[in-house]
Image (spheres, grey):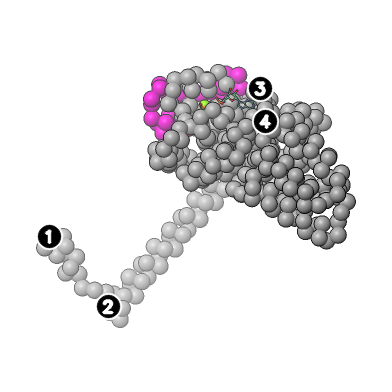
Amino acid sequence: MLPGLALIADVPPLDPTGPLAPLLLGGAVVLGLGTWALLRRRARRRLEHAQRPDVPRIALPPSIVAEGPTGLTARLRDRMSRTREALSTRFDGLFGRVVDEAMLTELEETLLTSDVGLATTERVLDSLRARVRGGTTDGAVLRAGLRDDLRTMLSSVSAPFGPGPAEGPFVILVVGVNGSGKTTTIGKLAARFVRDGKKVLVAAGDTYRAAAAEQLAIWADRAGAEIVRQGEGADPAAVVFDALDAAKSRGAQVVIIDTAGRLQTKKPLMEELTKIRKVIDRKVPGAPHETMLVLDGTMGQNAMSQARTFHEATPITGVVVTKLDGTAKGGMVFSIAHELHTPVKWIGIGEGVDDLRPFEVDAFVDALL
Ligand SMILES: Nc1nc2c(ncn2[C@@H]2O[C@H](COP(=O)(O)OP(=O)(O)OP(=O)(O)O)[C@@H](O)[C@H]2O)c(=O)[nH]1
Ligand SMILES: [Mg+2]
């Protein structure tokens, strides 16, 4: 036996009735109380620091006051006109008719064509049938009921950004497949934070192709944000490491991380995201505060399967649905809420810097139905 082991083996087992037992027990109690007092003091000091008025605090989500509410609703309606036509215009005809099986079948088709999704459509139709069985036959009342159902579906998973951390940067990790709109969304989001007076840094974690960092740099410039990037093929986790160091030393309040959207095989994606998250958590404990999955609204139900894959790979805190301006498939927003139970936090309704909107249930439902 090794000498060290022999030593341990030679220590006689502690006799609970022996003379040394109370001494050891007392020692353990003193040590425990000491640690507890130390942790308490540290927590109090951290709280006092966080409550100091000069410690920057992040108000989230970025305000939208400057844009004015009336113009916003009109713009949303205008930009989402294709989905609205696919839903609302057909509803006009359907709910003006007698509610029978033929009408319900047509309604089902209408919802499915707008990519509301099978499970969500069935749930909506069940609720409508229950209302009809309960004696409601008036089309306008049924239509209002359908609208309420859809609103409830979205509200149950609606959640804003934040709250921001009391200290250190608010870290947002952005994931999604190629071309879904990640970089554009980061640019628009950065511009919003900058407009709200925040110091923003973006991290070019998509090192897969050189053009990706270049595109992000253009957006950062446009938004008034700083960028941390490395060469093509660099380790994304290393870029994130540098970016968080830079954010701390430069006092950035918001860090938004771009990532590559490779989805060919699930395993590397999982590995890469896990590695990035580990680096983030080590640099800013508890971060990322938000992991946003960007989905291309024109993909409709196909985006749902992407969402499932990402959900398996990494914890998602919210979804951004982009390109809702160019599609009649905006109904997929309802199935994200209903089937994935994930809040939709932002929607993209154009390619301009102002074309990212916080997702507001009432405004969205009003714009569509
Ligand atoms: N119409 C419209 N186009 C958008 C919107 N968001 C993004 N786009 C466009 O979609 C295209 C792809 O956007 P990117 O931001 O490059 O997408 P990405 O996810 O970063 O793509 P990769 O870097 O290839 O993974 C660009 O041409 C954008 O201008 C939107 O809300 N509406
Ligand atoms: Mg990109």
Please, what secondary structure does the residue beneath circle 2 have? loop
State the residue in front, 90 or 233: 90
The percent position of residue 9, horizontal first and vertical second, equals 18, 68
* Disc ID at residue 333: none
In the image, what residue type sits under mark 4?
Answer: Thr
Q: Based on the picture, tell me whether residue 228 belongs to the magenta stretch.
A: yes
Q: Which residue is mark 2?
A: 15
Rendered residue at 69%/38% (across/down): 114
Q: How dense is the environment of label 3, judged by Cα within 10 Å: few (below 14), some, or many (20 and up)? A: few
Answer left or right for 139 relative to 111: right
From what the image shows, is residue 266 above or below residue 217?
below
The tag on residue 327 is 4
Left or right position of 71 against 115: right
Q: Nearer the viewer, mark 3 or mark 4?
A: 4
Q: Position of residue 307 (x, y in %)?
A: 55, 41
Tell which of 113 and 47 is nearer to you.
Answer: 113
Q: Choose top left, top right, bottom left or bottom right for residue 73.
A: top right
Look at label 3 and name its amino acid.
Gly
Question: Which mark is in front, 1 or 3?
Answer: 3
